[in-house]
Amino acid sequence: MHWEGENLDYDSGCGYQFHNGFRSGTCYPYNVFDIYSRKKLNLVEKPFMLMDSVWLRREISPEDYFLEAASIVDTVFKHKGLLCLNWHSNLINAIEMKSFRYVYFSIVEYIYKRLKQEG
């Protein structure tokens, strides 16, 4: 499948699988480059920095995950970037995620407070 042929405007699939952070090295959207045709595509990548399943893979405490997430949120705000979270709807209520569920809401609340601070 060729993304542009499907009339997609953006993708948000670029991020780390085993830890949070800036896989693309940026928190800004950018045009995808097709290495085969050697041209910039109209498709925009909006890289994600935080993903829920990282917690399952790393087995860190919910508190440590939140602190890591807050640090990433702060970095994105500092650079006035676009914050993208990859949160899977099938995991939010999964038994494996029971002790982690509140972290999502804590992150969203933290983002909301940062937005209010920014005015």
Image: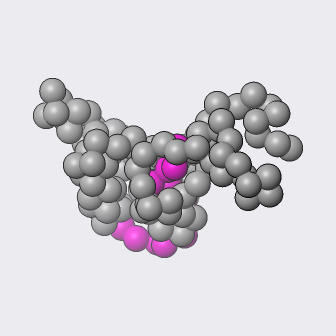
Residue at x 59%, y 39% (from the top left corner): 44
37 in relation to 4, above or below: below
Residue at x 42%, y 55% (from the top left corner): 26
- Asked whether 38 or 102 is in front, the reply is 38
Q: Is residue 5 left or right of residue 55?
A: right
Residue at x 32%, y 56% (from the top left corner): 72
Residue situated furthest right in the rendering? 1
Q: Does residue 102 appear anywhere in the picture?
A: no
* Relative image position of residue 83 (x, y in whole percent): 39, 43
Q: Does residue 110 appear anywhere in the picture?
A: yes
* Relative image position of residue 74 (x, y in whole percent): 24, 51
103 in relation to 113, above or below: below
- Quadrant position of the N terminus in the picture: top right
**Residue 31 colored in magenta in the image:** no
- Asked whether 28 or 76 is in front, the reply is 28
36 in relation to 39, above or below: below
For the record, the magenta segment spans 46-61
Residue at x 57%, y 64% (from the top left corner): 17
Q: Quadrant of residue 93?
A: top right
* Relative image position of residue 97 (x, y in whole percent): 50, 54
Q: Quadrant of residue 96?
A: bottom right
**Residue 49 colored in magenta in the image:** yes
Q: Quadrant of residue 3?
A: top right
